[in-house]
Image (cartoon, rainbow, N blue to C red):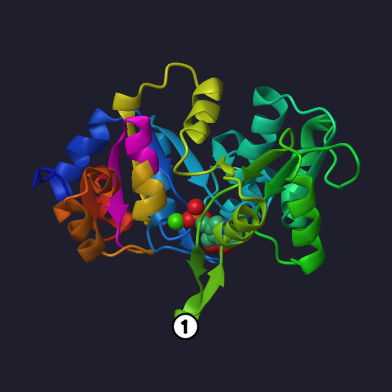
Amino acid sequence: VARCPRLTKIRGPQIRNLLEAKDFILFDCDGVIWHGETAITGAAKVVSSLIRHGKNVVFVTNNCTRPRENYVHKFYRLGFTDVMLEQIFSSSYCSALYLRDVVKIRGQVFVMGCDGLRRELQGGGRPLRGGGGRDVKAVLVGHDDKLTFLKLAKASCYLRDPDCLFLATDNDPWHPLSGGRILPGSGSLTAALEVSSGRKATVIGKPSRFMFECISSQFSGVEPAQCLMIGDRLETDMLFGSNCGFDTMLTLTGVSQLEEAQEYRDSELAANHSLVPDYVVDSIADFLPAFEE
Ligand code: PLP
Ligand code: CA
């Protein structure tokens, strides 16, 4: 078995050296920066210190339920007072860019998702409609808290047309809530439509490289070697980082455990090695000593 020479738990001066070597720091949000409505202790200070030290900081979240404006408010509310709209790349925003700039959609998009996703699609004066009808050229599936059987049935019908695109904001299977409960993710709805249509959705969010294309189209001179992706989920964040050629860091404040990363590392399946982080920290609060003079 070829073992990956990675998965290094780092602290203190090693974190400092790593941060000095990187110009772009990409943060996943839930499980890294906050848990739902509670900021992770020390995270706001880490983010503002990085910005003050001249780092480009961006946030890559698979949460498609809000438009970017709402994220700016959420960051502010949780004490991240220097985060701006331009730093936020959500799966809803990137889906809007994909529809507008990549497939240049004309006609309607049938959206299975929250109002926030619909608002993001309609933002910026883009001629996108979130309804359904005879002229449906794409089905976009995301987290839908008002899911009905009728919506699934309609989407399944639209997908019978091979010219109708099948897109998913993200493919996350589930999300943790407090007290050990979970919420089914967009991936569970995508799976239902994949079965009913016999088709595979194109995923916009992590681990797809498309989110990096969105970032590099808006920040000039982003080199993968200059990027560090920090996340809490191996199957989305670490795979995204390795798909993009970044160094990756797992923080243990979220979904994935160190033991799962070790299992992927020791797996005989070479594809599993792309899910293994380069570095591991207990929390991004471990960065704080790196900013002390
Ligand atoms: N989608 C939804 C609906 C969520 O509630 C969450 C996490 O709370 C996510 C996606 C994952 O977000 P992130 O990529 O920031 O971890
Ligand atoms: Ca996360």
Q: Which portion, as a residue range, is magenta?
A: 240-252
Can I make out residue 220 in this image?
yes
Residue 241, image x and y in percent? 35, 39
Residue named by callout 1: 179
Residue that protrudes farthest toward the bottom in the picture: 179
Determine which quarter of the picture holds residue 253: bottom left
**Could you say whether the residue bearing mark 1 is in a helix, strand or loop?**
helix
Q: Find out if the beta carbon at label 1 lies less than 8 Å from the nearest ligand 1 atom.
A: no
Can I make out residue 77 in this image?
no
Residue 54, image x and y in percent? 39, 29
- Between residue 172 and residue 254, name the one nearer to us: 172
Magenta span includes 24: no
Residue beneath the point at 50% across and 56% down: 172
Horizontally, residue 283 falls left or right of residue 220, namely left
Residue 18, image x and y in percent? 21, 37
Residue beneath the point at 49% across and 78% down: 178
